Image: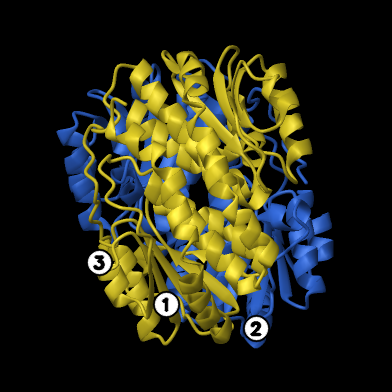
Chain colours: A yellow, B blue
Amino acid sequence: VTSEFEREIAEQPAVIAGLIARREEVEHLAAALVAAAPRFLVIAARGSSDNAARYAVYLFGAKNRLAVALAAPSLTTLYEASPSMVGGALLGVSQSGQSPDVVAVLADARAQGALTIAVTNDAGSPLAVAAEHALGLGVGVERAVAASKTYTGQLVALAMLSAAMAGDRERWRELEALPDAVAGVVAGLGDARAAAAALVGAGHLPVLARGFNRATAFEAALKLKETAYLAAEASSWVDFLHGPIAMLGPGAPALVIAPSGRADGDADGILDRLVAAAARPIVISDRPALLARGAAALRLPIVPEWLSPVTAAVAAQQLALAAAEARGLDPDRPRGLSKITRTR
Amino acid sequence: VTSEFEREIAEQPAVIAGLIARREEVEHLAAALVAAAPRFLVIAARGSSDNAARYAVYLFGAKNRLAVALAAPSLTTLYEASPSMVGGALLGVSQSGQSPDVVAVLADARAQGALTIAVTNDAGSPLAVAAEHALGLGVGVERAVAASKTYTGQLVALAMLSAAMAGDRERWRELEALPDAVAGVVAGLGDARAAAAALVGAGHLPVLARGFNRATAFEAALKLKETAYLAAEASSWVDFLHGPIAMLGPGAPALVIAPSGRADGDADGILDRLVAAAARPIVISDRPALLARGAAALRLPIVPEWLSPVTAAVAAQQLALAAAEARGLDPDRPRGLSKITRTR
């Protein structure tokens, strides 16, 4: 182990198991949310946490039939004209709980009378204090600037909240199997190192996914930018076909994140397009047929689609770690970044 | 004039004036929306239209206090589990009105009993037919693959709808002055050509803005990718400081889109950070002090902040056109793209 980032990636199976054991606490929170019967959910977040919010759009949309809006914090902090929260509930998601703009959006929603929940790793943080309800992740201190266990912790906390709101026992069983699956990904660091060789001299890197794993594409791109200084850019592959595919020249790499699920047919289609463009795809998936079509591949264990953003995110963290190593960079200390960004 | 893209960019003052003249029609639509009294708005869109939807988040948020969620079409098309639209209204935005996934989201919302409005350039398109109410932009056929007048037409249609919902006469006066301001931008193509020289050999290009013009950053990046094959990547400059700034090496270009408004102080701050990182900023603004700090600059006329995404988008189109020309590319025929993308 050569970096904090690598160490924290490896902690995730234990950290996720610890979080899942706190089912009762989350069920209590979920009961309050169900009692408030919101028509829509607004999520305030920045950086990696914003990617957790992207997951929440699909999670609460598909599993709880709730429309989710991502807050535009500047409406509150710059324009002093926040949208009405009548009929809505607000989740503030922040690793540190320190982002003043996320705190401002949550405090404003609470002042409007909406139910507010903070999801943060620091139960004593301003965000947790400002919220009516707070869920501390309890994943321990994160030392690397690039988030790993706080990100997957947020995903798991949101997944638990969704399962608890629906009172769905089957989904709790699926959650309980997750730590072992994550351990399986952690064991695959060698594959990530092999795949990273393709990224040593890379310029632009499209990072493509769809549905539940659109969030993973954004998180993977952020990690690759932060730690390996790669010009990685996330999009739904649908949006990619709407324009950015024009940029893809022969031999260009592209990262495809496609755990099995409802988007399988689509994933096959995007591989066809990439192969037709003579691009060099790196594939993160549990599907052997898809992995075989990649110039490089990171194999995931099979988990239900709604939880696959957790396992896929861990594989993406490993790829970012390996790409930083391969490019001779220190993954713990990205240029010009600090752990907490204070923006208003 | 050497391309359809250039011709269509230049048509925008007239096209926008034509749209603004249809005030009564939009007021009729707005009355229906006000009568439905939605708690939240969902917007379904793809590609350039999705950037118009990003504008709508700030527009309806700040000016009508309405929370806006961007639809995740795959919830409807892949997961067959659309969020509940009780208490909500849906806007489908599509230049062609052909995108099957946008049509599916709108049809589903209408089946759920929500008010639905189609904003499209083709009043006979499947989207317009599926919606309870339709607003045809009437901006004429767009021949270049890269959207120009259909994008600004969408922005203006949304701006009219917002002003009409609020019954705000002052904002109508501001709208009426917009075509002249756009004509001023069209006349500045020479500045765009001078600025584009800095992009001839560029690799990655961060495109930064905040608030109302976050949408413009995404639209500018999309145009630069489609027409000039530049690896342009949009973000709020707040999110940029949360991670991607790590990638910025000395001499790297960055496009800053900052018309005057509530984000002025912030814009000064991001210029400080770019200069400190020895980056080479290209600035699109109406503020002389900010323009003077750019390695290159595109000067905008002064318009109210809520309308500045229209003038700034036109400047960005000109930069994309000029960058394509400078790089020896045909801006009308991007590699691998067709005008209508049919995704499910």
In front of the other: label 3 or label 2? 3
Comparing A188 with A104, the one in front is A188
Amino acid type, callout 3: Ser
Mark 1 lies on residue: A116
Q: Is B223 left, or right, of A328 in this rendering?
A: right
CA neighbours of label 3 inside 10 A, class few (<14), some (14 to 19), many (20+): many
Residue B119 in the image: above or below residue A330: below
Q: Tag 2's secondary structure?
A: helix
Q: Position of residue A12 (x, y in %)?
A: 43, 44
Amino acid at dot 2: Ala
**Where residue A271 sits: x, y (%)?**
70, 26
User: Which sits earlier in the primary sequence, circle 1 or circle 3?
Assistant: 1
Q: Is residue A199 above or below residue B58?
A: above
**In the image, are marks 1 and 3 on the same chain?**
yes
* Badge 1 amino acid: Thr
At mark 1, the secondary structure is: strand
Mark 1 falls within which chain? A
Neighbour class for label 1 at 10 Å: few (<14), some, many (≥20)? Answer: many
Q: Nearer the viewer, residue B169 or A256?
A: A256
